[in-house]
Image (cartoon, grey):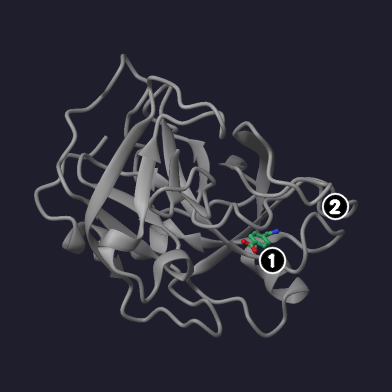
Amino acid sequence: MAALVLPGEARPFCGGSLINDRYVMTAAHCVVGTRPQDTRVILGKHELRRNSSTDLLLELSEVKTHPLFSTIFLWYDYALLKLATPLDLPIGGNLIAPVCLPYRIPYVREPAVAAGWGTTEGGQQPERLRAVRLRTVSSLVCGLLNPVTLARTMLCATGRLIAGGADTCSGDSGGPLTVRARWQPGRRMLLGLTSWGIGCALPLAPGVYAKVPAALDWIVRNTPDARYC
Ligand code: 4AZ
């Protein structure tokens, strides 16, 4: 789990995921139009206030947003942040390690976990990294609930579809939605990037995520000679 912060600040404005030894993946709407020097990445962070010895504050050398990203519709909400220096992974045992890329298969009603420092019920940013258990929703059901806007590059997930109450929210954007890697025990795959939703945790309003399996070719093309999970 990566935190995106402004230089000199401690509060993350978005999340991200380390996908290999040189790139963090996040949502395009978190970084579109910004320069590499406008953003820092923190890896190994858990508590917001406390600077723990495991925190790695990193600079970026490049911000690549997907060429088809639409700021209006949030189509192709993908960005890659190139680290100024590659990492020697894993770091600290397994404290900082890359998440795996997903298989190109359908994920329907698949148990998933989203994480971030986004706002909680009270509208406050939590002091500690939080995670929520969700389940992916079929694009048929999610398309019916979000009639105009659901695109091929989006997928939906919810904690409780009918009742609501478990979701990502403001500030979680760009952060991971992961699922278990079926054939690699103990590893997780990056299925989605937190992107948008109608409110947060409302009934019949699943959160919407940028669908990583739909961007695999672009990711691989834009992360030459990186070492993956
Ligand atoms: C946001 O504003 C945001 N419930 C992220 C995710 C969701 C809603 C809003 C999904 O960053």
Q: Quadrant of ligand 1?
A: bottom right
Tell me what residue is drawn at x 84 percent, y 47 percent.
122
Identified by mark 2, the residue type is: Gly
Identified by mark 1, the residue type is: Gly
Determine if residue 216 is in view: no
Q: Quadrant of residue 201?
A: bottom right
Quadrant where the image shows the C terminus = top left
Quadrant where the image shows the N terminus = top left
Q: Nearer the viewer, residue 12 or 116?
A: 12
Q: Secondary structure at mark 1?
A: loop
Q: Which residue is mark 1?
A: 197
For this view, does 32 lie left or right of residue 223?
right
Q: How many marks?
A: 2
Q: Which residue is mark 2?
A: 164
Determine if residue 24 is in view: yes
Q: Is mark 1 within 8 Å of ligand 1?
A: yes
Is 73 located above or below residue 194 in the figure?
below
Q: CA distance from mark 2 to mark 1?
A: 12 Å
Q: Nearer the viewer, residue 195 or 189?
A: 195
Is 12 located above or below residue 197 in the figure?
above
Q: Earlier in the sequence, mark 2 or mark 1?
A: 2
